[in-house]
Amino acid sequence: MKILAIETSCDETAISILEATGGLDAPAFSILSQVISSQIDMHREWGGVVPNIAKREHQKLLVPVLLEALTKAEIKQTPLGTMPYIKEILHREEILLQNIENSIASLGIPEIDYIAVTAGPGLEPALWVGINFARALGELWQKPVIGINHMEGHIMSPLLRGNTISFPAVALLISGGHTELIQLNDWHSYTLLGMTRDDAIGEAFDKVARMLDLPYPGGPEISKLALRGNKSDISLPRPMINSDNLDFSFSGLKTAVKYYVNDHSLLSEQDKCDISLAFEEAATEVIISKTKRALEQSNAKTLIVGGGVIANTRIRTALEHLIAGEFSDVTLLIPSLSHCGDNASMIAAAAYIRIEKGSAGSPLEAHGSMMLTN
Ligand code: KG4
Ligand code: ZN
């Protein structure tokens, strides 16, 4: 079956078209097109994502991104005939109408089976643009529209490179908004093992980067500097590393960096590299320690890692070492780099699993449950 998926939960306007086969036993995906239009330049000057700017950009970008995704996928189309109400629908949903008659009308109805859309969690104003756009297309093309949880998308993202999940599995989700350890006993059977009590790990990377006058998003910048860092006497805490649970805390680590920066007013380029390294090492140690405990306690056969922070080489390598050294029976599933950050292919993959399992809900149903639900 063919699924067109839309993702607008944060600062990426993304649409993918996938062909999915194999069912639950051997899900396989062919990505016909994946278009991601990043708004990072718009948000950079504010030092972070501004929800209303994200909303406005999604409204502007969705139509061009859709056209590009449809063209790249070379999907067959059947004539649309007249377009009695697309203009009204898009007006109602505040999608900008530049060239809409010429563009969408000339395309016809694409031969897809479903439309999937991220229903949450994410920035409310940004999410609604995508949800309403998906519903408008659903009405126009007469296709079913499915709502997908963004975090479930990250969990399913390794499926895009041909991996399968053996249960029980543990998912480690590390992104700008989330730091969670989740147990999966089966498809869609989730137990939250632990989560951050304050900042998400990606948020901590972004905030530390700001302290060092590095641009947003900070994660990639810190990683780059850390590569040139030397071991120093900078001593940073490993918050909650010895606590008797699987929760995280990154606010204390971030604050320790802040104190260090405040105490050393003239930081050289090398100082910044050394601080980046010390911060990355502290954050990595906490992630590894908690993940290790989660794997031990759940007897997991698979460790899935998702979210933008897995692009970090130190964290990635440390997880690979953990599995190779201490959990040789566990399969580590990491998405390819192009699917680590936010994208719509992972939303389509998650939708396929929901469709095959018979548990797909509408965007409005899915929007109500911001946490992962069974
Ligand atoms: O999953 P994602 O694209 O968006 C959501 O938050 O849902 O993750 C974005 C986060 C940002 O905080 C960014 O700084 C972080 O991922 N990130 C990294 C790296 N690349 C992106 N953090 C550490 N190292 C990286 N190489
Ligand atoms: Zn994300």
Image: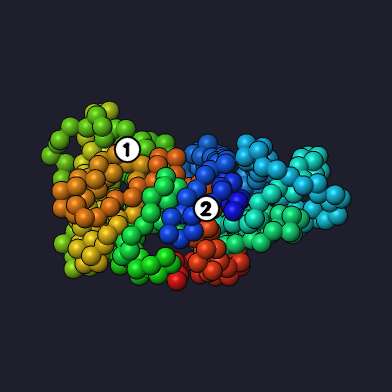
Instruction: Give me the C-alpha separation between circle 1 and circle 2.
Output: 39 Å
Colour scheme? rainbow
Q: Amino acid at mark 1?
A: Ile
State which quadrant residue 280 falls in. top left
Question: Which quadrant would the C terminus be assigned to in this image?
Answer: bottom left
Q: How many marks?
A: 2
Q: Which residue is label 2 attached to?
A: 21
Residue at 45% in and 40% down: 338
Q: Is residue 198 visible?
A: no
Residue at 42% in and 51% down: 159
Percent x, y for residue 365?
58, 70
CB of mark 1 near ligand 1 (< 8 Å): yes
State which quadrant residue 271 falls in. top left
Frontmost residue, 55 versus 322: 322
Frontmost residue, 294 versus 271: 294
Q: Which residue is label 1 attached to?
A: 222
Percent x, y for residue 226?
26, 35
Query: Mark 2: which secondary structure?
Result: strand
Percent x, y for residue 355?
55, 63
Query: Mark 1: which secondary structure?
Result: helix
